[in-house]
Image (spheres, rainbow, N blue to C red):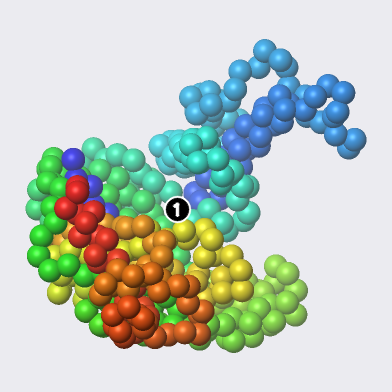
Amino acid sequence: MLNLTYNYRIYPGLDQKAQMLDWLEQCRRVYNYALAERKDWIGSRKCPVNACSIKQEYIISADAPYPDYYKQQNALTEAKKAIPELKAVHSQVLQDALKRLDKSFKFVQERGFGFPRFKQFGQYRSFVFPQFKSNPINGFEIELPKIGAMPINLHRPIPEGFALKRVRVVFKPSGWYAQLILQADLSVPEIMPHGEPIGIDLGLEKFLAGSTGELVERPRFFVDWQSKLRWLQRKLRNKKKGSANYRKIQAKIRQLHEHIYSVRREFHFLTAHQLCDHAGMIFAEDLNLKMTSRGILAKHCLDAAWGSFLEILRWVGWKRGVYFAKVDPNGTSQTCPQCGAHTGKKELGERVHYCDECGYTTDRDVAAAQVVMQRGLVLAADG
């Protein structure tokens, strides 16, 4: 089964915008209530009888069952009878808010981090229609249940053989978007190693160094716009919270963050396509991204967004039939790609690789990329 997500801009009317904003708020309320219910149940089981909080402790009966998704879904049916605002929202849209919370708790159980947080006003920005009886797209319009038809910018056609399964409506600072989840009954074979190999080394001096000697400059996505962001945040600090001018500056800050994200994402896609143009196999380091997001260079590492780039590179490679794999990153800058000798640890300011054994000299990042390529070829041969 093959799933694809296509993102399109939609143009709802004023009444439809108000209705969808109200739906987002009702979903946020349901999400927060369900989260509080689960947290209270967990808290009542964690606190020892002789060590309760000095301020307060929420006590739940010992025989009360855990409020899982199914119990909260049944309670939602009763809540809709008492709360008129919930009746106006599509039933499956509200159920998806509970499913989203349930997935978050399952993620915590599997990974051990990422405990769900309460959503503040304006932080809940999407809702999902999980199924449709018929295709909601008619020409250049999309018809959503209980909302109605609205124009949609189909800038690229939906591929043949795919059926529309779900629609996620997303509210961004630049407008409203519809993410169409398409599904086809296809089995895509796994890509096997073939063609010309390329190893890449990611860094801050250069965003990317290739084993072929190619060096890609690193754009400063966030750093270049940081001064404007600080200026807007200073203006926001001097405005009365909740006023019209306060909300206007908030909207400008959100738009700036979205612009930075869009420019960074476009750069990642263009770079990934350029690599796939000249390679049949691409190998990269399996970086510890959690460690790179700490320390004095954390801002620049997060600005480069290596993790996002590697995921995009994997997706572009899969789409274009290019084999992609990650290799062990330990010692790539301390190994000579020519003779395999250990050259010792290099300081960050040392940008040239020189081997005392064979005399091989090249750029430090290019040498590391060549070592990555060699390890990747061994990995591909063993696999």
Q: Residue at x 27, y 40 (%)?
A: 132
Indicate the amino acid at tag 1: Ser
User: Which residue sits furthest right?
Assistant: 54
Q: Quadrant of residue 17?
A: bottom left
Q: Is residue 268 above or below residue 42?
A: below
- Residue 318's spot in the image, x, y percent? 19, 57
- Residue 349's spot in the image, x, y percent? 50, 85
Which residue occupies the foreground of this view, 84 or 2? Answer: 2
- Residue 63's spot in the image, x, y percent? 67, 13
Q: Which residue is mark 1?
A: 126
Q: Residues within 10 Å of mark 1 (few under 14, many from 20)?
A: many
User: Which residue sits furthest front?
Assistant: 357
- Left or right, 122 with respect to 339, comes to right
Q: Is residue 356 above or below residue 201?
A: below
Which residue occupies the foreground of this view, 295 or 329? Answer: 329
Q: Quadrant of residue 84?
A: top right
Quadrant where the N terminus lies?
A: top left
- Left or right, 142 with respect to 97, comes to left
How many numbered marks are there?
A: 1
- Residue 83's spot in the image, x, y percent? 59, 35
Which residue occupies the foreground of this view, 215 or 381? Answer: 381
Q: Residue at x 63, y 54 (%)?
A: 120
Residue 304 visible? The answer is no
- Left or right, 100 with respect to 119, comes to left
Residue 41 visible? The answer is yes
In the structure shown, which secondary structural element does the residue marked by tag 1 occupy?
strand
Which residue occupies the foreground of this view, 313 or 365? Answer: 365
Q: Residue at x 31, y 57 (%)?
A: 326
